[in-house]
Every structure is written in structure tokens, then in C-alpha cells.
Image (cartoon, grey):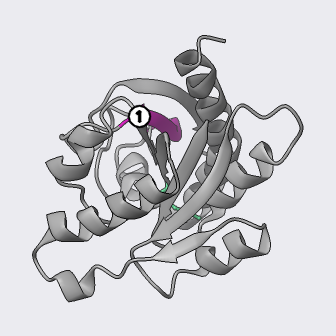
Amino acid sequence: VRVAVLISGAGSNMAALIDACQAADALYEVVLVVSNDPEAGGLAVARSKGVATVAIDHKPFGKDRAAHEADIQAELEAASVEVIALAGYMRLLTPFLVNRWEGRMLNIHPSLLPKYPGLDTHARALEAGDAEAGCTVHLVTEGVDEGPILDQQAVPIVAGDTPRTLAQRVLTAEHGLYPRALASFCARIRNL
Ligand code: GRF
């Protein structure tokens, strides 16, 4: 399955997805990495792993999100992409992309959804006194962080945790969860 990963930043999840698919017998191949930020650190990481990259800066498009997405769509089509994996992609998507890719676009979110959609998930989990936190891979629908859940991984919250220490523990769990969830999703759509 030909996968594009959309990023905005460091791309550590993207790197985990690429590393996993470069193993033998992988069910998917990351054929393209797209960033809306030309300065995203993940772009160089992807290139160093031999994956094609494209930066499509959203700023020149101003408020016209759909026009920005149309340029992304053109790149996805040119690369014959079949599945999109959002990995720290920090732009809200419009129906232009969401509808076109419904059922074929995954996201990873740093909480145990449906708890804590949106931002600052770790601070909110600590504030609530939760015993555990975690991450979720879900299908993308129009409602932010609301699509059907594919898989989750919990991690403990420990005494003395700060949003920063918890974020690190969850991120490490994300790197295990996302390749696993994407591979089983690809197996499912291929009826393997
Ligand atoms: C991850 O925690 C992801 O769940 C969130 O943003 C972070 C991205 O990190 N949406 P990276 O760019 O994959 O390193």
C-alpha cells in the first residue's frame, strides 16, 4: 500500500513509520512525505531515509485552506498515494481533503480518545489526576479527533510527571503504536 505521511514538525512518528516499512515483508511503503512547513525538521529526516519529500507552505494561501489542500492533493495523485497518515500535521483539514480520503486517512493523537481531543492533552490528563495516559490511531473524519478508533496504547502516569515527561513517554508509545496500526489497517484494506 502506497502511503503518504503529512507532517509539520520533527517527524519522529513519520520516521518510525518509515523505519518499520523498510523492514522485509512490510505491508505498506512510505512513498512521500508532505510538510506544510518548509522548515520542518522531518523533511531532512525523510530524505536521509530515501523517501521523497515536498513542502507546500500554507502561508501564501492565506485563509484559502482548500486551495492549499488542492496543491497537496495534486502531489498525492502524482505519487499514486493510496493511504494518508497524518503525523503531527498541525493544520485543520477541510472537507476538500477529508471527504476525498474518508476511510483512507489515519491520524495519531496523544491521548486515549475520546478523552482530550485537541491540544494540551498531557497537561489536561495530569490536571484531571488520571492514572494513565496514552495515544490513539483513528480514521480522520470532519470532526477533529472524532473518527473511528483503530488502536490505542496506554502508558502509566507516574508521580512527579510534568506535561513534558508525560509527553515523552506517550511519544515513545506512539512510535510503537503507529506502525502497528497502519500495518494492520493496510492488511485489512487488502483483505490479507
Ligand atoms: C505527536 O505527539 C503527535 O501525536 C502529535 O504531535 C506530535 C508529533 O510529533 N499530534 P512528531 O512530529 O511525530 O515527532
Residue at 42% in and 63% down: 75
Q: Where is mark 1, residue-wise?
A: 104
Quadrant position of residue 155: top right
Q: Which image quarter is the C terminus in?
A: top right
Residue 19 screen position, x and y as percent: 79, 52
Amino acid at circle 1: Arg
Q: Residue furthest left?
A: 63
Q: Is residue 133 magenta?
A: yes
- Observer-nearest residue: 58 or 71? 71
Q: Residues within 10 Å of mark 1 (few under 14, many from 20)?
A: some
Residue at 65% in and 63% down: 12
Residue 78 screen position, x and y as percent: 46, 58
- Observer-nearest residue: 130 or 185? 185
Q: Is residue 76 left or right of residue 10?
A: left
Q: Is residue 38 magenta?
A: no
Q: Is residue 165 left or right of residue 60?
A: right
Height in image: 131 above or below 10? above
User: Which element is circle 1 on?
Assistant: loop
Residue 114 in view: yes
Q: Is residue 94 left or right of residue 23?
A: left
Height in image: 55 above or below 23? below
Q: Which image quarter is the N terminus in?
A: top right
Quadrant position of residue 122: bottom left
Q: Residue furthest top?
A: 191
Extent of the magenta region: 130-139
Residue at 68% in and 69% down: 46
Residue at 30% in and 33% down: 102
Q: Main secondary structure of the magenta part?
A: strand
Height in image: 69 above or below 148? below
